[in-house]
Image (spheres, rainbow, N blue to C red):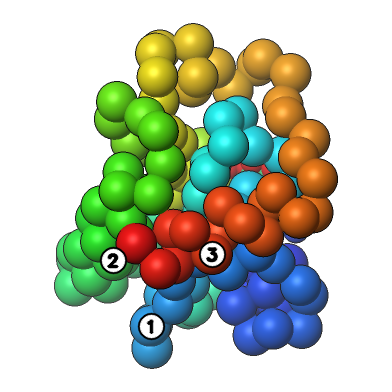
């Protein structure tokens, strides 16, 4: 079971943002910007483009709904979208609140936010 499957199953704690029967969204533990969110399919597939076309379309639609909530809840100009998968072998989409391009630099030092702040942000997105 991947670490992200364990998160979606509630076996490992996370700052949950949204979920449905097939998908789960939670805050990245080392965010590039406050509210940086990861969106995953519950089905454990390593590479995003190995999803079936239906699964891919459903994941993107779920991500779209999450991004709309993020835009409402957080002070940002846009929600940036990226897929890397260099670290965790469970397909995931990065959604990053952007004030500028500099907020989406994967090589820049990551933020470390207090647990209460992460919880506050996750709840704000969930309730948006
Ligand atoms: P990548 O696989 O290259 O797209 O990067 C994986 C992302 O998952 C990184 O941004 C990590 O900070 C994030 N990450 C790894 N473990 C956790 C975790 N337990 N909870 C939340 N985010 C995580």
Residue 62: image tag: 2
Up the image or down, 102 lies above or below 27; here it is: above
- How crowded pointer 2 is (Cα within 10 Å; few <14, some 14-19, many 20+) is rated as many
Q: Does the residue labelled 2 lie within 8 Å of ligand 1?
A: no
Asked if residue 54 can be seen in this view, the reply is yes
Disc 1 element = loop
Q: Are marks 1 and 3 in contact (CB under 8 Å)?
A: no
Q: Counting residues from the N terminus, which is met first, the one under dot 2 or under dot 1?
A: 1
Q: In which quarter of the view is residue 126 placed?
A: bottom left
- Left-right relation of 62 to 100: left
Q: Counting residues from the N terminus, which is met first, the one under dot 1 or under dot 3?
A: 1
Q: In which quarter of the view is residue 98 placed?
A: top left
Between 56 and 68, the one lying in front of the other is: 68
- How crowded pointer 3 is (Cα within 10 Å; few <14, some 14-19, many 20+) is rated as some
- How crowded pointer 1 is (Cα within 10 Å; few <14, some 14-19, many 20+) is rated as few
Mark 2 or 3: the one toward you: 3
Q: Position of residue 36 (x, y in %)?
A: 53, 42
Q: Where is residue 104 in the image (x, y as percent from the top left)?
A: 49, 22
Disc 3 element = helix
Label 2 and label 3: CA atoms lie apart by 17 Å
Q: Are marks 2 and 1 in contact (CB under 8 Å)?
A: yes
Label 2 and label 1: CA atoms lie apart by 8 Å
Residue visible at 40% across and 12% down?
Answer: 101
Q: Where is residue 32 in the image (x, y as percent from the top left)?
A: 60, 29
Residue visible at 29% across and 30% down?
Answer: 78
Label 1 and label 3: CA atoms lie apart by 16 Å
- Residue on which the image places disc 3: 123
Residue visible at 64% across and 37% down?
Answer: 31
Q: Are marks 2 and 3 in contact (CB under 8 Å)?
A: no
């Amino acid at each position: 079971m991947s670490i992200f499957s364990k998160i979606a199953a509630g076996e490992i704690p996370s700052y949950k943002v949204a979920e449905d029967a097939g998908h789960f969204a939670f805050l990245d533990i080392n965010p590039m910007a406050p509210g940086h969110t990861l969106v995953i399919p519950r089905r454990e597939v390593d590479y995003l483009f190995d999803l079936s076309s239906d699964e891919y379309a459903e994941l993107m639609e779920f991500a779209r709904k999450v991004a709309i909530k993020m835009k409402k809840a957080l002070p940002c100009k846009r929600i940036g979208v990226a897929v890397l998968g260099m670290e965790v072998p469970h397909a995931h989409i990065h959604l990053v609140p952007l004030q500028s391009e500099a907020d989406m630099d994967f090589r820049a030092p990551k933020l470390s936010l207090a647990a209460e702040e992460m919880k506050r942000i996750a709840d704000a997105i969930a309730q948006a």
